[in-house]
Image (spheres, grey):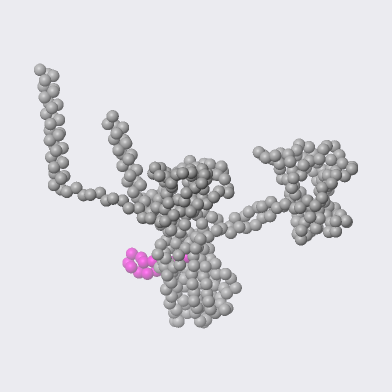
Amino acid sequence: MKKPFLIFLFVSFSFLSYSQQFKWKKPVDSICQNNFYLIDIDKDVLSKLNNEFNDVKIIDEEQKEIPFLMKKESFSVLKRVFKSYKIKEKIHWKNGATVLIIENNGAQKINNLQLQIKNFDVRKHLELSGSDDYKNWYTIKENYTFRSANGLQTTSEIKSLNFPYVDYKYYRIVIFDCYSLPINVLKIGYYDTYQEEGKFSQIAMPTLTRFDSISNKQTYIRVQYKETPYLDKLILNIAKPKYYYRNARIFLQHHNKKGQVYYETIKQLVLDANSDLTFYMDEFAERDFYIVIDNEDNPPLEQVTVSAYQLNRHLVAYLEQGKQYDLVFGNKKMLYPPNYDIAHFMDEIPKDISTIKTGELKEITYQKKKKVKSSTLWIWGAIAFVAILLGYLSYKMITEMESS
């Protein structure tokens, strides 16, 4: 009985000491159903994490850990979206052919059409022609063959019809049905590919200290944040003059072991009046840095301001309705990220899931252990000694009785 009890005490003590290392917490907003959610990691949370972003946990009302994945927005993502054309006419020729006519609004230049077709397992021949007036048609491609459509785990498949660039207003697709019944074309369209910029959140404005050196022909701007910024984007705003083109750089100030000052250049900048003065970093964590502007023979730039942004981060987790969840974070003793099973099931997490916020930031307070007075320690020590002595005497008496 003693061994399980000791193990229980050890585990309980370990968990208690481990949980008490977190300094901050934020309640997670209530949810309406069991599902995966994106828990927003705002600047209040991010600024208090370590450089590896691994000292954060989700716990429920029973203090149990909830597995999660941390997800960060990308600077930009290449996205591909299917867009449908309007099918203006669908007819069947007497010689056994299906004719589909679509309208290309704006006569945009294209080099492919995508046909979403119900699954089939026959061979079909196609030809494509174009027209600007819906009367005179011109050949684009002929003798094109679709052999089969077998969408994986779906009842349809998208087939590509590729051809040289053209810009007709109307396109006519003829599918020959001489030897079999028609195939079922559901949609005709194209894939629009575009770059989607990542989503950012602005962090608190820094304190700026400025010094213009006439002798060095430079402007020094010291940028200071109260908390670790982890910034991904830096935007400068310059009020005057209207036209300027200056070289600049971001540098850090260090001290060596002898106390001597030296500087480390982090990033080279070009300040151009014809640009938006947006510069991208990657989780830049310095709370104190300098921007140096080379003025050459020009007057210093006026009213220079600095704003910084972080790429949005989220925790992806499966949460249950009716339970209360908290984020706990800020633990200097956590050196490694958690290892959860959910990392092996990323492909099964839905892409479009709801985002939920967190509530008020609170500091976690723990009751300090009261120090036991030295006099009390002596008493307990004496009791322990008497107990051991009595145990020894009892053992000796029992052995003597058994021997007699």
Q: Is residue 60 magenta?
A: no
Q: Is residue 365 left or right of residue 241?
A: left
Placement of 211 over or under 120, stated as above or below: below
Placement of 290 over or under 160, stated as above or below: below
Q: Quadrant of the C terminus?
A: top left
Q: Is residue 261 magenta?
A: yes
Q: Is residue 81 left or right of residue 29?
A: right
Q: Residue 317, percent across and down?
A: 49, 46
**Looking at this rendering, what residue extends furthest in the right direction?**
95
Q: Residue 324, percent across and down?
A: 43, 46
Q: Is residue 95 left or right of residue 311?
A: right
Q: Is residue 376 left or right of residue 325?
A: left
Residue drawn at the location 48% of the way across and 69% of the way down: 306
For the residue pair 313 and 253, the one nearer the viewer reads as 313
Residue drawn at the location 42% of the way across and 61% of the way down: 228
Can residue 51 be seen here? no
Region in magenta? 254-266
Locate residue 387: give its quadrant.
top left
Q: Quadrant of the N terminus?
A: top left
Q: Magenta part mainly helix, strand or loop?
A: strand
Can residue 204 be seen here? yes
Q: Residue 5, percent across and down?
A: 29, 34
Placement of 386 over or under 38, stated as above or below: above
Residue drawn at the location 71% of the way across and 41% of the way down: 156
For the residue pair 357 and 115, the one nearer the viewer reads as 357
Q: Residue 85, percent across and down?
A: 75, 53
For the residue pair 24 and 194, the one nearer the viewer reads as 24
Q: What count of labels does the image hold?
A: 0
